[in-house]
Image: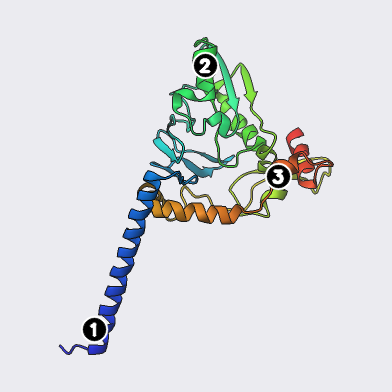
Amino acid sequence: MVTNPAMSKTRRRLAFAGLTLLLVVALLEVVLRLVMAVGPFTLHYLDYKTEQWHIDDNPHWGVWHTPEVTTTHVKSCVEATYTTNAFGMRDQAREKVKSGARVAVLGDSFVEGYLVDDTETFTRVLQDDVLKGQAEVLNFGTSGFFGTTQQWLVYEHLARDFSPDVVIVAFLNENDLFDCSWGYWQERPPRRRPYLVASDADPSGYTLFYPAVEAHAERPGRWLENQLMRYSYLARLANEVSLRIKYAGLPPKALEVYAEPPGELVADAWRVIEE
């Protein structure tokens, strides 16, 4: 077999360049770990989950939780354990038909219990510490751009089946407005969420609208991203820098919510919520 000297030389150069790059990355990783160990430097945007948590495949309201899974949510400031039941609720095991008083709580990440352990969610504290177990408090909250329209559909297609005596709707006067607004989300990467939009046939009425977005359980590369965020400080730094660049100079959405007079998107969102 005849060996091409030029090809062999090119391969050696590529191998040398690859090895050099690996050594540089390893050195940067070591330096970054040392800096974080001895200095005040913090990576605020570290964020990963050990198991898949959200899925965008519910046919009625879009985002929900993977049923019967336990995941650890890790951020730079906290680590929390999340568990779901057979219905995908972040809750204890529940039965649809059961005697006794019941409270159904609908809401977003505040109800879901973002960044707190299972026993510290709002619904568990209300059930165990406030009501002393005299009523079941069922958690139908989830994060993931989840607004009042989605909460209504969760009630219609799931929570109602549990025959609650009381229904609590938790509302945040900021992102809950934008999560209900198709006018806001149609200018951004589409999400598989339902929206109430003004009806062409009836100007005073609304129609439930589902954007043409394919359902997906997990975006491609998410597993690799989780592993990098979990073990590489360099990956965490790159993530923080990219997010700081992405959101640099953007005003908080609360300024739009409390503007006088309110902008058209906010005014429309209030009309949707009223509906």
Q: Earlier in the sequence, mark 1 or mark 2?
A: 1
Query: In the rendered image of this protein, does residue 235 appear above or below residue 158?
Result: below
What residue appears at the point 45 percent right and 26 percent down from the top-left corner? 118
User: Mark 3: few, some, or many residues within 10 Å (few <14, many ≥20)?
Assistant: many
Q: Decide: marks 3, 1 in contact (CB < 8 A)?
A: no
Using the rendered view, name the quadrant where residue 6 is placed: bottom left
Q: Nearer the viewer, residue 218 or 61?
A: 218
Residue 178: x and y, percent? Answer: 68, 43
Residue 188: x and y, percent? Answer: 64, 54
Tag 3 residue: 181
C-alpha gap between disc 3 and disc 2: 33 Å
Q: Is residue 232 in sight in this rendering?
A: no
What residue appears at the point 73 percent right and 42 percent down from the top-left corner? 255
The nearer-to-camera label among 3 and 1 is 1
Tag 2 residue: 127
Query: In the rendered image of this protein, does residue 45 appear above or below residue 5?
Result: above
* Amino acid type for the residue under numbered disc 1: Ser
User: Mark 2: few, some, or many residues within 10 Å (few <14, many ≥20)?
Assistant: some
Q: Nearer the viewer, residue 186 or 249?
A: 249
Q: Nearer the viewer, residue 197 or 231?
A: 231
Disc 2 is placed on an element classified as helix
Residue 150: x and y, percent? Answer: 62, 37
Query: In the rendered image of this protein, does residue 55 appear above or below residue 186?
Result: above
What residue appears at the point 36 percent right and 58 percent down from the top-left corner? 28
Using the rendered view, name the quadrant where residue 38 is placed: top left
Res. 246 mark: none
* Amino acid type for the residue under numbered disc 2: Gln
Tag 1 residue: 8
Q: Earlier in the sequence, mark 3 or mark 2?
A: 2
* Amino acid type for the residue under numbered disc 3: Ser
